[in-house]
Amino acid sequence: MTTRELFLKHVGQTSMAPLAFEVTKAQGCYLYDANGKKHIDLIGGISVCNLGHGNERIKTAIKKQVDDYLHVMVYGETIQSPQVQYATAIADILPATLNSIYFTNSGSEATEGAMKLAKRYTGKSKIISFKNSYHGSTQGALSVMGSEYWQQAYRPLLPNVYQYDYASSEALDAIDEHTACIILEPMQSEAGINEAPQAWFQQLRKKCDETGCLLIFDEIQTGFGRSGSLFAFEKIGVVPDIILLGKALGGGMPMGAFVADKEMMDCFSYKPVLGHITTFGGHPVCCVAGRESLAIIQEMFKANPQFVEEKRALFLQELNHDCIEKVNAYGLILAIHFKDYDTNKKIIDQCIKNGLFTDWFLFAANALRIAPPLTITHNEIKEACAIIIQSINEVMHESS
Ligand code: PMP
């Protein structure tokens, strides 16, 4: 049997039509398929590989840690310097109230932990989230996901969860003394890039302060430079009570985290003790990879604070075609909107044929996703955009 056939037979499937791209090597901004063909990677593992593939400094850090030790004990009982150092590095770059980092294995688990912490700390259970939001696929995270389509098959989910339109005044009105937390992305990526006005965020912060509702920002996708700042909340100018991290947090290794004030986090230590448990969270190899990756991203911003914005502008300049309805862009996440899903799917498939790897968005199936490594060069951006335009032309030619 071919590797492809074995993949379809033995690797649990979640799609009727998986991309089934066989990766044999990944380097810099490129993926190599089974025939050795080079493809420009425009999605970086969906906002994970912010430094591209095969970064030497990250690999060296991982190799050293592999020699020192791998997993030694469940989370929280032993002092492991990779964990301590990475938690300290994260606390150093966040505001003073975000100083206690709980490492998990994934973004979904960070969402779970944060929701539990909010309920435990406030003693309340009402949770508010938003339509077209994505916070993960486990049942708690699914309960706050903003889509009946993905939720329906798994009901009953968590009770006492209420959903509103993003950036709506109804959501602000719904926050009251019974609300444990409100969870949202500072920009809704999976909706094909949906932003909220800064003034709305300020009103949100104010309402949370008035009622004691905890404000949770999910920066799993926007974090670590993707937004054009290290974190999107810096652009917005509003500090959340809890921040969720994931994806690029691990420098290519699996990792998530939720971050809060120590006084809040400490309530996981009593009544009941071990309020949130993970065996592998904060794995030492993931911590060293993440810490090295963060250091490099910080150096990139120090060298040129505008580098993400400059690359975004270049994409926007190059992406011109009559078929493109609009391009939404937030830092280095861009969504090229076409008239419908069929057109988008054909263009994505054609891009892959032409040596460019990309995907769509959960709630915007008509939009092509661009979330390349932040290290993508200006020449690579021009090359990628030329392939997209060529692919659009070929699809249009075929269907005319
Ligand atoms: N929140 C957001 C905003 C995400 O984009 C994702 C992953 N796409 C998650 C949460 C869940 O992360 P994970 O897949 O690591 O569980």
Image (cartoon, rainbow, N blue to C red):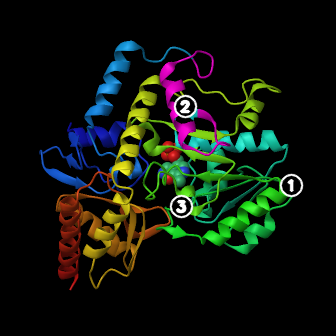
Q: Is residue 146 left or right of residue 90?
A: right
**Which residue corresponds to mark 1?**
178
Q: Residues within 10 Å of mark 2 (few under 14, many from 20)?
A: some
The residue sitting at 84% across, 57% down in the picture is 211
Q: Secondary structure at mark 3?
A: helix
Q: Is residue 384 left or right of residue 186?
A: left
Q: Which residues are magenta?
A: 74-102
Q: Residue furthest front?
A: 303
Q: Name the disc covering residue 88, or none.
A: 2
The picture quadrant where one finds residue 78 is top right
Mark whose residue sits in front, 1 or 3: 3
**Which residue corresponds to mark 3?**
235
The residue sitting at 42% across, 62% down in the picture is 331
Q: Residues within 10 Å of mark 3 (few under 14, many from 20)?
A: few
Camera-nearest residue between 148 and 355:
355
Q: Are marks 1 and 2 in contact (CB under 8 Å)?
A: no
Residue 166, visible in the rendered structure: no
Q: How far apart, in angstroms, are the residues tagged by discs 3 and 2?
A: 23 Å
Amino acid identity at mark 2: Thr
